[in-house]
Amino acid sequence: MSSSWRSWSGLESASGLQAVTPADAAEVVEVVTSARAAGRTVKAAGTGHSFTGIATPRDVHLRPDRMRGIVAVDRDAMTVTALAGTQLKVLNAELERLGLSLHNMGDIAEQTLAGAVSTGTHGTGGRAAGLAAQVAGLELVTGTGEVLRASADENADLFDLGRVGLGALGVLTTLTFAVEPLFLLRAEERPMTWDDALAAFDDLTAEHDHVDMYWFPHSDRMLTKRNTRVGTDLYAAEPLPGWRAWLDDDLLANTVFGAQTALLNRVPRAIPAANRFASRLLGPRTYTDVAHRVFTTERRVVFREMEYAVPREVGLDALRECRTALERSGLRVSFPVEIRVAPADDVALSTASGRDSFYLAFHTHRDADHTAYFALMESVVREHGGRPHWGKLHQLDAADLAERYPRFGEFTALRDRLDPDRVFANPYLDRVLGR
């Protein structure tokens, strides 16, 4: 019986698929070798939180439902190994139960570990922003049906090149993360003016462990979020009262915001005034909680997103140019622009590979036409050497990306070796990596 698949955003879908739910690496090998022999392709598509077609299946849809949970905890090495189909939110909860935590993470926790690592999911600030930079080991099934384990000491070339693997090198079956004792973050959220926020940006990122900003287009207002580590004494936690969390994060940030942006799609001329009004309603709040509850938020409003990483030193200039271009364009945008930073890492296809990075994320409501806005913003950030998030919308191809990633050729050569018959190929990977 054939099945269908659809991404969270609704931008990607597929039908007429053979769906399989392997429970371990041996069963994945059977699926891959059978598909290879038949000249078919295999994609492991989880929760579908990528906006691009990076995980879109064409023939065989490998579902991760039976490959979930933690399988090993090494408190001496401070590592945790989990099955690759585990959702990030499940890993976070299990780590909390064990008194452990990841160092950093993005603001959405719905993705599977395989999907989040393979697309370069990142947070902001810290010693390591990207999840892939926190990976200490991995296991995958290659396109020839071989099971390979990789770490700094074993198959080091695969570990070096494959931590952001785009799903092009194999099917991830387990991932091992470096972890640390469960810690608290003090979150301080407050509005600022555009000028004040940009003037203070370097100081804020130096003084706090994690800084995130949101600019409301057509306004002079920013919402700033500063997260600071305050130790491991869980009795010092002062989380938001239940009513405040429900009001801010459930009712206002999801229900009201979703209704407002859906309505503004019909009357775009009202967007500038609505953005200015909404930004004025934002008030300060401070709370302290375990890390993953501060880092991550629930997103029920479906949107489209494009995100680029530019070199840290040109980030504020790129942001200013994006604002100028938007104001001159006459376009109306109801979603904030998100601004984050990340330290350089050594992961070959990470957007922060080899350079401190400044991230600009652009969003629209799912029912709004994002094409003109994203194309305009992309034209600005490309001129600054921007690298697109692999799981978010962009128009670059293999030739463009080879110019932006010094080790791009090494990665494609490894792909030729591990998946010579392109068992894991799809149209998106054909575009960004070549055939």
Image: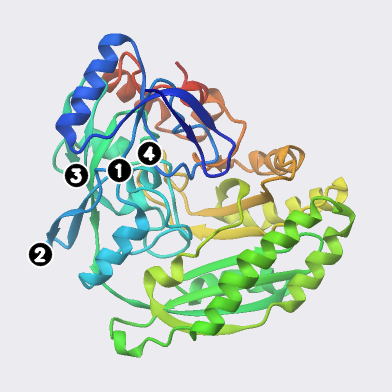
Q: Amino acid at mark 4?
A: Ala
Which comes sooner in the sequence, label 3 or label 2? 2
3D distance between C-alphas at marks 2 and 1:
30 Å
Q: Is residue 412 above or below residue 196?
A: above
Q: Which of the two discs, 3 and 2, sits closer to the camera?
A: 2
How far from the left and from the top, in percent, is residue 195?
Answer: 74, 71
Which comes sooner in the sequence, label 4 or label 2? 2
Q: Quadrant of the N terminus?
A: top left
Circles 4 and 3, Cβ within 8 Å, touching? The answer is no
Q: Which residue is mark 2?
A: 76
Mark 4 Cα shell of 10 Å, populated few (<14), some (14-19), many (≥20): many
How far from the left and from the top, in percent, is residue 412?
Answer: 38, 24
Mark 3 Cα shell of 10 Å, populated few (<14), some (14-19), many (≥20): few
3D distance between C-alphas at marks 3 and 2:
17 Å
Circles 3 and 2, Cβ within 8 Å, touching? The answer is no
Residue 389 in sight:
yes
Does residue 137 appear left or right of residue 314 in this picture? left
Q: Which residue is mark 1?
A: 65
Q: Which residue is mark 4?
A: 348
Which of the labelled discs sits on residue 152, or is there none? 3
Residue occupying image coordinates x 23% and y 53%: 69
